[in-house]
Image (tube, rainbow, N blue to C red):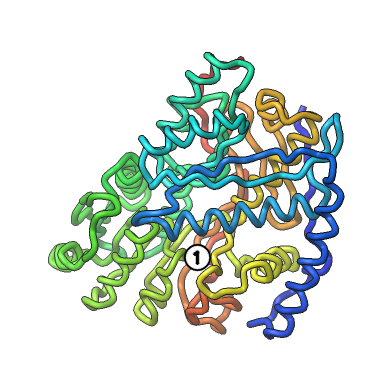
Amino acid sequence: MRAAVAAAYDPRFSGRLKGRWPMQGWKRCALAWSAGWMLASSAFAGGEPVRIALIEGMSGPFANAGAAVERNLRFGVEQVNAAGGVKLRDGTHPLELVVLDSKGSPEEALVQLRAAADRHIGFVAQGNSSAVAAALVAALDKLNVRNPDSRMLFLNYSADDPALTGARCSFWHFRFDAHAGMRMAALADVMARDRALRKVYLLNQDYSFGHDVSTLARQALAARRPDVTIAGDEFHPIGRIKDFSPYIAKIRASGADAVVTGNWGNDLTLLVKAAREQGLDAKFYTFYGNSLGAPSALGDAGVGRVVAVADWHPNAGGAKSDAFYRAFRTRFPAAQDDYPVRRMSQMIEMLAAAMTRAGSADPVAVARALEGLSFDDGFHASRMRAQDHQLIQPLYVMDMDKVGAPGVRFDNEGSGYGFRTVLAVPAQRTEMPSTCSMTRP
């Protein structure tokens, strides 16, 4: 039987945002938030915290992406704690986030996993690399068999390789992001309507996720736009390219009128920066074009040319969506921190709901409580599919424009540019058949 959890935000943060919020408003809400947090914290005097280890690249070429994850997870932890924490059989407990630097390396991630195990941390979060995620899943499959009294659960917020909930699915792994196939299907719906599309260049990072994006793009175009030619299909070393100008030159020479890329972090920012500097007249169909400096790097060159797909974005609309955005911006008011990712804080809220449902922080009990769990915060209803531990949630395809344009009330990172919804895909339409055959404890 599926359980459902309804999430709500502090009423201090409710209501519709209209444009930029005055600084005095930010300050008043920040003070109110701090007071509420201090009051809530006092309720946990006797309860030991339930710890979650964030194993992520906090240094190196993708440190900015790691910092963004930490902000979003910390926001989720603080929201849960401000609402009273998790209610277990022995009382109420707060959540605590423990940050461990993997340096973006699978090998270092495994070292940090061992460190988390030594500290008896039962929950691990990671997402910024499908290669790292695959290494963690393989390690946990072995560790949890060898150490039945100190098992660990893996919460994946971004690693999108379909195999992680397919051929390599695991009872110990839950994915809270749409996988690459789900994202590409939504993006392809918009590409299919782009009648100006004739030649497409595929440029992706040279690891499992990038290869998935390339394969899925080819399949989607063959099925929906067989008239479109693949002008190039290239992979580049992940996190090592400082100047993408040679790649932009190849794209221009190919005659492509669009680029499809799953690049993220600095690999995306530097790519779009080079495209702007070289004056590339092409559309970008991206997985993450709305994130981490990309809109600022593009500026006017991105208006009408950059398309992205995400589980949520600030201009999705609705009072409860706005309230979530307001709460995040109150907590993190700096322009460079303006990158709220709903699925990350939702992951923490669903984890807390599963613990409360199980009455326990035991990873096995929590995993069983998470299976089939439905979540409804009033603007992003979703469900954790029990068969493969894949979250089924809405997706938005959006395009870039100047703030103030129709559908673009809020910008990204103070850039003056934001995104409007061009296609909203309800959760049930994002669902794809599962190929998972899972071994359960």
120, above or below 13, in the image: above
Please state the total of marks drawn on the protein image: 1
Q: In the figure, residue 298 lies in which quadrant?
A: bottom left
Give the quadrant of the N terminus.
Answer: top right
Q: Amino acid at mark 1?
A: Met
305 vs 122, nearest the viewer: 122
15, above or below 287, in the image: below
Q: Regarding mark 1 in the picture, which secondary structure is present there?
A: strand
At 37% from the left edge and 74% from the top edge, which residue is drawn? 297
At 44% from the left edge and 52% from the top edge, which residue is drawn? 58
Give the quadrant of the C terminus.
Answer: top right
Query: Which residue has dot 1 on it?
Result: 398
Determine if residue 178 is in view: no
Give residue 118's position: percent from left, percent from top: 55, 29
Give residue 435's position: percent from left, percent from top: 48, 26
At 57% from the left edge and 41% from the top edge, which residue is drawn? 53
At 61% from the left edge and 29% from the top edge, which residue is drawn? 120
| 89 on left or right of 333 | right
Give residue 185's position: percent from left, percent from top: 45, 48
Q: In the figure, residue 216 lies in which quadrant?
A: top left
